[in-house]
Structure formats: C-alpha cells, structure tokens
Amino acid sequence: GGSAQQPATSASASTGGGTGAAGGLIAIITPSHDNPFFKAEADAAKAKAESLGYQTSVASHDDDPNKQSELIDAAISRQAKAIVLDNAGADASIGPVRKATEGGIPVFLIDREINATGIAKAQIVSNNSQGAQLAAQSFVEAMKSKGNYVELVGKESDTNASVRSKGFADVISQYPDMKQVAKESANWDQQEAFTKMETILQKSRDIQGVIAGNDTMALGAVAALKAAGILDKVTVVGFDGSPDAIAAVKAGEMHATALQPAALGATSAVEQADQFIKTGKTGKEEKQSIDCELVTKDNADEFGVFARK
Amino acid sequence: MTATTKTPAAVPAERSAARARRLSLLNVAFELRAFIALAVLIVIFGLLSDSFLTVPNLITMTKHVAINAVIALGMLLVILKGGIDLSVGSIVGLSGVVAGELLGGLHVGGVIAYPPVWVVIVLCVTVGMAVGAVNGLLVTRFNVAPFIATLGMLYVARGAAMLISDGATYPNLAGHSALGNTGFGLLGSGRPLGLPTSIWIMIALAVLATLLLAKSPFGRWLYATGGNERAADLSGVPIRRVKTIVYVISGACAAIAGLIIASELTSAAPQAGETYELNAIAAVVIGGAALSGGRGTVRGTLVGAFVIGFLADGLVILGVSTFWQILIKGAVIILAVMLDQGQQRFKRRGAAAAAVAATKHHD
Amino acid sequence: MTATTKTPAAVPAERSAARARRLSLLNVAFELRAFIALAVLIVIFGLLSDSFLTVPNLITMTKHVAINAVIALGMLLVILKGGIDLSVGSIVGLSGVVAGELLGGLHVGGVIAYPPVWVVIVLCVTVGMAVGAVNGLLVTRFNVAPFIATLGMLYVARGAAMLISDGATYPNLAGHSALGNTGFGLLGSGRPLGLPTSIWIMIALAVLATLLLAKSPFGRWLYATGGNERAADLSGVPIRRVKTIVYVISGACAAIAGLIIASELTSAAPQAGETYELNAIAAVVIGGAALSGGRGTVRGTLVGAFVIGFLADGLVILGVSTFWQILIKGAVIILAVMLDQGQQRFKRRGAAAAAVAATKHHD
Amino acid sequence: MSAPVLRACEVTKVYGGTHALKGVDFPVTAGRVTALFGENGAGKSTLMKILAGIEQPTTGHVELDGRPVRLRSSRHAADRGIAIIHQELSLCPNLSVTDNLFLAREVRTGFGAVDRRAQRAATRAVLDRLEERADPDGLVGDLRLGQQQLVEIARALLQEARVLITDEPTSALTAPEVEVLFRVIRELTAAGVAVVYISHHLDEALDIADDVVVLRDGTLVATARAGEVDIRWIVEQMVGRDQDTLFPDREPVLGEEALTVRDLSVADPAVPDRLAVDGLSLAVRAGEIVGVYGLMGAGRTELLEALAGRLRPVSGQVLLDGRPLDGPGIRERIERGVVLVPEDRQRDGLVQTMSVGQNLSLAALGTYVRGLFVSQPRERAAVARAITDVTVKTSGHAAAIGSLSGGNQQKVVIGKALLTGPRVLLLDEPSRGVDVGAKADIFELMAGQARHGLAVLFTTSDAEEALHIPDRLLVLARGALVGEFRRGELTREELMRVSDGGTPKDGAA
Ligand SMILES: Nc1ncnc2c1ncn2[C@@H]1O[C@H](COP(=O)(O)OP(=O)(O)OP(=O)(O)O)[C@@H](O)[C@H]1O
Ligand SMILES: Nc1ncnc2c1ncn2[C@@H]1O[C@H](COP(=O)(O)OP(=O)(O)OP(=O)(O)O)[C@@H](O)[C@H]1O
Ligand SMILES: [Mg+2]
Ligand SMILES: [Mg+2]
C-alpha cells in the first residue's frame, strides 16, 4: 500500500522543503482510484504540482456528486490555491464548481467537461467524441465494414458513456452492413461485461465484433470470447488505453483502443493552475480538448501509462 | 436436622435504588465516552492539520454530517423498534429524481404546469413516506422480515428512480422566476443566521425526534415495542401502527436528505444515496443503540453521525489515501461497538463483584 | 354445592399423527412451489426467447449462477445459525487480489518465489477463512451483533484488497510454464466432462453442504443453535464453536467464488464482488430460510440462486433495460418471500382448522 | 348470590392440538373474591386470558353485565373495566417503573406530552399503597422478581377496574408482601370490585376466597362456597383421584454418595448483585430421589443450573462420585453424567424447529457417530427406544415437536436427558404445565431411573408432590437451606411455614 505514505511524505516534503514558499495547496479530486486511468491522472497531477512546489491533497469522489461537493467544500475551507477536478457528472458538478469559484478558488477540469462555461478556469478534456470515432473507424476497417457486432455501454448515468456511444454510432451508422445485434450496459465493470457477453453469445455466436465504452469492459468481453473459443474470429475494440488493454493489443487479443492522454491533461492542468496563481490568467481558452490516440499492434510499443513514452 | 434461618439478603428497596443510581452514572459515563471518542478524533485531526479546527471547516463538516444525521434519525426509530431499513439510500435518490421531474414541469394534458417549490418538497417527502409505508405494510401485514422487505424496496425504489429519470441527471434545479418555481436552491445554499439550511434542518429534526421519544406517548410505545413486544401488545400499545409509522418516518427523513443533496447540487442524479443506509445504521449503532431494539437515544445517534462524518472529512484533509479511509472506517465501526459491548459487560461485572462482596457478609 | 365430573381429554396421539403427516405434505408442497417459481420463470423466458432453453445457454447461465450459489451456500450456514454475513462481497475481492499478488510472485528476501497454483488457491481460501474467523471472534467473544461485525469487516476487507493491489487490477493471471505456476485459468475456463469447473465446484460444495447439514453432528448442532440457542447450549452443543465455524466456512466459500471470478477473467480487480452479499442473502431467503435461524435447506438455497441468476440472464437475453432489471429483481425478492410467509400462515390455519374440527367431537 | 358482572359461557379454547378449555361456565361476582383452582395446565390462565380479551374463545362467548360482548383485545377489555395481573410478567425491562405502569394509558399535558410529574406522583401513591419502596424512575429490568410482580399488580390497581383478575400474583412474593396484597384486595371487594384469584398456594387462596371454583383438564369440575370446603377437598377435585395412586410408595435402595455440593453460592443471573443460591450444601446418593421445595425465586433454578454447568458459582464446590466437578461447562458435565431437565421447556428444553426424534437425540448425538456422520440406524434405534421408555405419545420420530401436548413435550425433554446415560439426573419443575396422566408417568419414570441406580434431584412448587415423591425433601428459602425432611416426616402446613423461612411447629426432626 505505497499510496498510504505518499500524502504524508508529500506534505512534509513540500512544507519541510524550502520550496514551500511558492507553495500553497492544490486539491486533486478524481473518481475512484480503483480504475487505473484516474489513478494515473491523479499521480501525474500530484507529481507535477509537487515539482512546482505545491502541497497536494489527493481524494476520490467515487462518482458520488454529493461526496464531490463535500470534497470541494473541504478544499475551500482549507483555502486551497486551486482545484484540479475530474468531475462526477456534467450537470451535478456545475453547482460545486461554481461554489469553489465564488469561494475564490480556481477550478481546472480534466478528463470530463461540465455543461456550463465561464465558471471553471479551464476544461481540459480528452476529446471523447473524437476518440470514439477514431476507435470506431479502426473497428469498422478491421471488420471490413460488415458483420454483426455488440456494443458494451458504460454506466448509463455517466456522461462519457453516452458521448462515446454516440461517437461510435456516428461512424458505424455510415456502414449499412454493420449490424448491431446487442447493446448492453456493463457499468464499466469487467465481471459484469464477462457475464453479459457470455449471455449475449448464447443469443447468437454469429458475432464478428465487440466495441466497448472502456477497456475494462473490453477485457471482460475478451475473457468471455476466449472462453467461447471464438476470440480469434472477433474484433474487440476498447477505450482509455489502459496498460492492460495495451498489453492485450500487443498480444493480439484486442484490435485497438483509443488512448486518452490522462497524464498529459493532468500535467497541463497543473501548469495552467500554476500560471493562473502567479499571473491571474491561464493564457489559454477555457475549453481545450486533447485528442485521443489510437493504439494498435503497430504502435503499441510507443505508449506507456496513459501517455506516449 | 437443624432448621437454620439466615438474615434475608438486605432489604431490596434502597439497594435497587442504589443500583439504579450506579447504572445511570454508568450510562452518563458511556454517553460521555461516546463524546470523548468524538473529542479524541477532533483533537487528533486538530493537531495534525491546522485547517481542521477552523470555524468555516467545522461548519462545512457539520453540514456534511447533517445529511447522514437526518437519515440516521429516521433509522434510529426503526432500530428502536427492533427493525432495520435498507431502503433509505434508494429513497434519497428517488426523492431527488422526483424533485427534478416536478421542477422540470408536469405535463397535464397539453399544458405544462410548474408546481411551486413548497409543493415539490411536500410531494417528495410524501413519496418517501409512501415507500416507507410499503415497508411497514410488508413487515406488519405480510410479516416479511424487515431486512428482506427493505432490501427488496432498495431495488424497487432505485429502479423507479432510474426509470423516471431514464438514468439521466436533472440539471439546474434553480427554477425560473418566470415560472414562479425558484428558491429550491436555498435548501442547500441558504444560510439563515450564518448556518447552512441543512444544519438547521438537522437541528430541527433532532429536537422533534427528542420530543417524540422523550415526551410523547408514541415514544414510550416505541421503546416498549422494541423492549418487549408481547408486553407492549398486552398493555394495549398499537404495535402494528407503531411499527408502520417508524418506517414512514424513516422514509420521510431519507426523502428530506435527498432534497438537501439535490438542492446543494442544484441537480439530481438517480444514483444518489447509494450505500447511505450503511452509514446511517453505523451512526445509530455507534451511538449506542441495540439492533435488537429498545435501546438508543437521539443524542447518541447524533454523536455517531459526527464520528463518522468528521472521520471521513478529517482523513480527506490529512490526505489519507481513499483505500486507508475505507479500512479505517470499518475498524472504527467495530471498535466503537466493542466499546459499547465492553461497557455493557463492565456493568455486569460491577454487579457480579457486588454480589461477591455480599457473600462475604454472610459467611 | 355441585361437584360435576367430566371425561378427561381423548388421547391426542392419532390426531397429532394426522397433523404431522399433513405438515410434511405441506412442506413437500412448498419445496415444490419454490421449484415451480423457477419453472414458471424458465417457461416464460423460454417462450419469449428461443435461445433461452438451449443446452449451451442453460450451461452458461448455470455457470453464472454457480458464483452466487457458492457464496450463498456459506451464507446459508450463517443464516441457519441466526446470523448474517455482509463481508462476503469484500472477501471475494480480497481473495482475487491475494491470488493476483501471489501469482505475480513473492519477494522473499532478494529473490522472487512463484508459488504453484494449488498453494495460491490454498492461501486465498485461508485468507477468506481468516476474515471469517475474525467475524466469528467478534460475534462470539465480544458479542458484537453479526450485522455490525460483518459490516465493519466489509470495509476492512475491501480496504485491505485496495491497499494490497494499490487499486490496480492484476492483469494476466495465466502464469508462465517457465515459473511452473500455470493452470490458474483452468478454474474458470476448464470444462471437465463438458461442464465448466465452476459448476462442478458448486455441485461439490452443495453435496458437501448437504452431507454436513443432513448427516454430520455439526449440522444438527447448527440447526439446534439456530432454532433455540439456549436449548442447544443446555444439551451440550458447543454453540460458540458452531457459530465461529459457520463464519469461517462462509469466508472460505466467498474466497472460492473470488478465485473462480479471477480465474474466469484471468485478472483480479480489488473492487470485484461489491454488493454480492445482497444477492447471496436474497438467494438463501428466497430458498425458504428464515433470517431468525434454524430453518433452511441446501436445496432451497440452490433454487433461490437459480431464480436470481436465471432472472438476471433472462432479462438480458430479452433485452430488458437495466433499470427495469433492478426494479424487477426487488419485486421478485419480496414476492418470493411473501409466498413463503403465505405458506407458513396457510400451515398454521390448516392446523387450527383441524383442531376446531376435533373440538366438535367433544361437545 | 347477586348476578355476575362478568361471565364465561360454554367457553372452549383450542391451541394447536391442546384442548385448554372444554365448554367452561365461569361467573365472576361483584364484591366477592372467586378463587380458581387447578393443576398446572388445567386451563386457568387460558380462561382468564379469554375474560381479559387477550385470547378469543374457539367456541362459546363472554357476557358482561348479562349482555354478550366480544372483547377484541386486552385494551378493549380494559376500557370496559376489566384488569388482569398476568401470570408470566409482562413488563418492559428497558422502561422505568412509572413508564410501565402508564404504558398505553399515559397521562397527557395540555400539549399532548406525557405528564411525567403527574405519573410519578400517581406511581408513588400506588406503590405506597402496596408498601413497596422501589424507585419510580428505576428501570424495571433492575428490580427483583418480587418487585417486578408488585409493579404488575400496581399497574392493574391503577386502572381502577370493576373486575380484577389476578393470575398467580404472589408466586414471587414474600409472606409480608402477600399480607399487603390481601389487605388491598379486601379494600377493593369492600368497594364492590369483583376479584378472581389464582394461586398454587392453596391455603393462602382459600384464605382470601369467598367462592371456590376448580378446573381439571380444561373442564370445570366443582364450585363451592369457601366456607364449605377444605384444602383436602380442593386437592381431590384438582387431581381427580386419590393422592396415593398418583404418588406410589417406593422403597429406595441407596448406594454411594453420587453428588456432593459444598457451600455453593450462585448469583442471580437476572439480578447479579443478589445471591440466588447462598452457601448451600447437600448430597444425593445413587438410587435416591431428593426433592427441592421452595417458593418461586427461592433459587432452585439457579442451584440446578449451577450444578449443570450453565451458571458459574460465585463460590463453593461440587463433587461427582467424590471427584471435583468444578470448572468444566455443560458439555463436559453431560459427558461425566450430570444432565439437567430445565424448568422452562419452551425456552430451554426444546428446539421448536426440529422433529421429535432430533430433539431426543440432540444431547447424545456424539454417541451415534460412525466415522464422520451420525449413523441413521443407531440414532433411529435409540430414539425409538426412548420414545417407548418415556412413553411419548407421538406419530413417530419425524413428527413436529409442536404437535405434542405439553406433557409429551416434557417427556421428550426428559428422554433427551436420559439418552445421555447420566449418573445424576437433575429435573427443574418436571411436572409444571403437565397434565395428570403425564405427571404420574414422569414420577414413575423418575422412580424407575432411581431403581437403576441414578441419583435424582428435582425441584417442585407443588406441596403434595414435595411431600410424597422424594425420599428426602430439602426446603429452600431465599437461596438457603431452611429444612431437610424424610418422606412423611412433615405436613403441608409445616411445609408452608418452613418454606417462608420459619421453622416447623414441632421443630421437626
Ligand atoms: N399459547 C399456547 N399455545 C399452545 N398451548 C397452550 C398455550 N397456552 C396454553 N396452552 C396449553 O393450554 C393448557 C392450559 O394452559 P394454562 O396456562 O391455561 O394452564 P394453567 O392452569 O394456567 O397452568 P398453570 O397453573 O401452570 O398456570 C396447557 O396444556 C397449555 O400447555
Ligand atoms: N437462567 C436464568 N436466566 C435469567 N433469569 C433466571 C434464570 N433462572 C432463573 N432466573 C430468575 O432468577 C430468579 C430466581 O428464580 P428461580 O427460578 O431461580 O427460583 P426458583 O426457586 O427456581 O423459582 P421458580 O423455579 O419457581 O422460578 C427469578 O427471577 C427467575 O426468573
Ligand atoms: Mg397459568
Ligand atoms: Mg425455577
């Protein structure tokens, strides 16, 4: 449990270390770290912030808007210099973000945007729609523009689930021979994706492709297809570019995944926060989208943990 | 043989009086101890973080406690009766969704009607009470075990919330002055006399609950039903009504909590309140209530809610990793209850010791 | 003064005999009814979807049922004793994580040791049993209420899983033939005699549980403890040991379920198994067990697990929306238990009627 | 006599298989005390529960002031001026004395809140009337059994009812407390209240009674004026046959001293700082039947539970065949041959969820194990033997335990104990709630076991039993031994006096 000591050490490092002068607190709030994507995000932001001489507090809201609101309250009452937030819902997060801004604390959103502008100082969002289209495009090509496919959707109450699903549809709908035989939510969960995929396979084994809203679900599907012994006949595409998925791509179990440069977004958010704290402006547009990159067997070696090496 | 005659064990009256005093002292000691547990928590966090003991932070944390406390007060009544209510978390979500739906306007025939905020609030609480009523009905009429009845309703209410909202979050519940349905936000963001509304609501409900339990006949009936249902029944306590009412109240409290959350976020998500039932139960039990019923106080429950809330926020402020937070929470729940058990046993041992002392007198 | 004298009561023997027969008949009827509930489900889905009643699909669904059934078998023992185990879900996650950690190699001093699969399995089950032992200890020694003790361990075990894995998923548990730790995958993907290993495990455990409950002295002790703890105690039943053991077994079953999941996915996630405890409890209760203890069977529990599992998969095959799935699940749980209650009341009424009929004889 | 206030007409009551009442006519007259006699299980409480609206008659009805009424609930009856003191205490231990007294009939202030001051005052008043000094704000759970019973009585008095039903109100009271109660009852009758009085202390009941009614096996067998009858007559009506056939004479063949108890003290589990057993010494020899008599609360249950290893003694020593039996718990003691048939068979004796056979074999299960499993044949054989030995009337080993009558259930509990092959058999109130036939069977069983060399120690609250069954009778009062007699050595009246802590008239033996 290395993460246990990190906060303590970091606090002491930055207060103890003379850099504390520049310091002040940057609160980093993300969804649950049991998803490697958010952990990578948080770690990157934390590292950057401490390298710039800030104290950090890392917390996760587990996609509970109320808990997020509480964490922001905490940051406010601790007079944080800035909040780096991967939010818990495009609508549910508007209130809390406004609260922080009015409390004089600049908020820098990463990964997910909110349905309001002019409140957060920056919304550095990996372009889910673009990434989804990228993934779908390569999915279609791998399937030679025809065949039956299954879509595994993320938690229905999560914006990215619908954005990505729409991105997939935008592309695939252009190919009349691509037939969607099932669309099930697996709540971002691997075991659930596994179970549902198995059940779907019972309806028909005549399936050539599976496209999933994130890599965890894609890997669940892979396991199910492997168990059914038809993995080699099925094209599996995921989203996120998690290390596990990249490994699966290398192993040829998955065809591709759209990598969100989590680290990049997080670090640049911290840089802009630093800018804003020092100069009062970020010098950038509020809405900044970072394009996702497609990871396939050919370029898989070029990628590390949610970032190019 | 010789018929021996011994002095009867001393006259009972004043001895039992003495015991009564000793017990009440112990109870106070225990109440104190729960407070002390909280105090210790506060001191530790206060020392480790300079921002913890600031007035704004204490207010903020209390505001967070309020939500769990409101649910826990309803849960306390159910537990006093010897039941349990697993459906409160789902009711939180459902009530928020209903609020979102209503503030979005009711399609009556062709036109869209925008009910004023107070109507919305009343309706949401009514929905919560309705779910509670179903729980009560299942428990009293169909004698389904409370755990199962409310477990079922946990799914039903959550499913309903999802279906009504189609899984989507209701954005912007601020309302429009044009439609005369503004003001919903005040529930969460209002600060009468400098304290957030939710804290006032918690205080109000706590006072009501105290009056209900300590002063009203219903309170007596509830404790009696939890303490010895048969005796209560024979004495003419309407136990079925008592049981049903506690579930209805619990539902109402959960609905109110749901409204507070929706109002603070000025948006309502159908998945809001997941696993809140566990926090509420934990608060009640840490507060010294017995799941078997008949034992528990409002004061204790509040302390329990504060212990859980301050613990959570404190760990965040200290930047303890989420993973440790989970583990520590579990440990604290167990320890707090073992503390209570310990106190119980201590009571008994004390009495036993007295007995031994008494023996010495005799021979 | 009049001194009338009447004939004493007729010998109750043959009447009670008749009632006994009637009761046993009713019991069979009930068992049948639970099966019928399942049958109804199967028929409905069979009619609505032609792919539902295919052999491969039945096998797949049974495979899905197996995981919940394995956990439910452990839960059954705890519930027979009159307790409850909320920590099983977390144990599922923990056991998977431990497997992942071990298959990844143990850092012993400088070198890394790769324990063979069977060692890994044994160790994981041991971990599950250890958590169960803690539950048992808290319940028997510190008499913490089972609900609270296992609720606490729910958090502690989950936290531990998160800390060990640092929240990350263990990717590829296939192992390397070079390291001699391959074969873990077989647990999930193996198909001895054409049936998935997990189904065989379920069958094996079900047989063991049946023998344990129906044939071994422990089983009788367990039913006695759950039926009337005081009487069991006075009959020399080692109730504390019995109580502790059931939690240990429950922990072991959960750990096995965790291993099956990890093996099927050849990867282990620390958050695996969340809320599985509720499904297990539901299965046991739908199977006709009483949360008050002393009543329940392995057969019933399996039927319960099948009802829940087939319902879930069936709804997926029919393409019913997730939200309806949640709501329907809750409704089914409640209805199934009300059915049971109804049957209980029917029993009582039957007996009463018989007695009244008997009265007619007299005057 | 004047017309009855309250009357049970041709009332029948059936519980499961048991016929508690069979067409009983029972009048209650204003200003008089009607004493209701009957053995355990005769149906007294059931009849009272019906009069108090707690139970509904299976057939027949109740008349109030000559008009038929249907008393839907205890509350409904209370509102019509019928108060009852329950045999088994029905108080909430987690509430104060005051709260218990006013439960469901709270005094309210203008705001509808509970008026504590008024209630406390009223509580003080009624407790004073009963000369009880318990603290009105003390928890009932902390009170001695006797005090709890007084609280129960006080609650009935508070209702100022026209009909007061008292079902064994004195079972846990000391002699002085009983005197106070009687004074209060006389005051009530003088004020025109109709009182029903039930007690197993026959002389005491006859003392307060104006009319006498006797129930046997759910049938009203006799009614009389108190003046016209004596205890002997009442007992004959209750038992329905001559004492001696119920209590066969026997010549014990005494062996070695099997059970020896030295200076044993046990704390009352209900009220830990009271000693239920107080420095008590006794010995039982193989083949001997020793009886322990005492009023309720005398500490008999604690004595036996301590011997059986359920309660830890505060001090003292227990020997089996001269070897110390200290330390080990119930299980070990059963293995060494000491087994208890508990007082409350529903609470401590039977597992209601298991069959007759499973209940019988529970304590001796270990002895039927072959390898890992219980051997069906061996268990079946043992169970079958037990069923015939203790003459359980049942459809078979698979019958539900609830389908048996009280007496047969008790026989099952005894059979369970015997299957462990004990050296010392402890029975706590083996005849309580058991009908006449079964009672005789049980005593015969005890005698038979003694003949086979068992040491038998049993308790009883029934004077006749105490005087006729045991070879040696020990009398307990407040946990201490106050007398020891051989069979036929003393009379009922002496026994009564001794058990109240006094000494027999002729300073017996
Ligand atoms: N709730 C009940 N369920 C089943 N049987 C019952 C119930 N109550 C009483 N009985 C049976 O009815 C018969 C009469 O019981 P009751 O309590 O009226 O006797 P009693 O005269 O009051 O005995 P005691 O002197 O011990 O109080 C007994 O056989 C008893 O076992
Ligand atoms: N195992 C026990 N647990 C709790 N309380 C008990 C237990 N055994 C007896 N008591 C209580 O202890 C007190 C002493 O009564 P006890 O039964 O021991 O006296 P007794 O002489 O056996 O009278 P009786 O047998 O008629 O009740 C009573 O309040 C009784 O209810
Ligand atoms: Mg009675
Ligand atoms: Mg006794």
Image: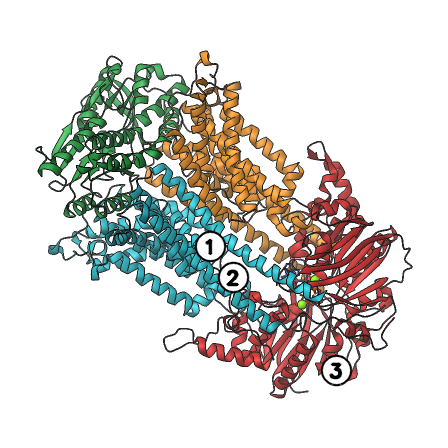
Chain colours: A green, B cyan, C orange, D red
Residue D35 in picture, x, y percent from top left: 70, 77
Residue C292 lies, with reference to residue D187, above or below; the image says above
Residue at 53%, 30% (x, y): give it: C126
Q: Nearer the viewer, mark 2 or mark 3?
A: 2
| Sequence-first disc among 1 and 2 | 1
Q: Secondary structure at mark 2?
A: helix
Which quadrant of the rendered structure holds the C terminus of chain B? bottom right
Residue A90 in picture, x, y percent from top left: 20, 39
Residue on which disc 1 sits: B83
Which amino acid type corresponds to the residue marked 2 in the rendered image?
Gly
Q: Secondary structure at mark 1?
A: loop
Residue closest to the eye, C55 or A60:
A60
Residue on which disc 3 sits: D226
Q: How many marks?
A: 3
Residue D323 in picture, x, y percent from top left: 80, 48
Pointer 2 chain: B
Residue on which disc 2 sits: B227
Q: Are marks 2 and 3 on the same chain?
A: no
Residue closest to the eye, D242 or A277:
A277
Which amino acid type corresponds to the residue marked 1 in the rendered image?
Gly
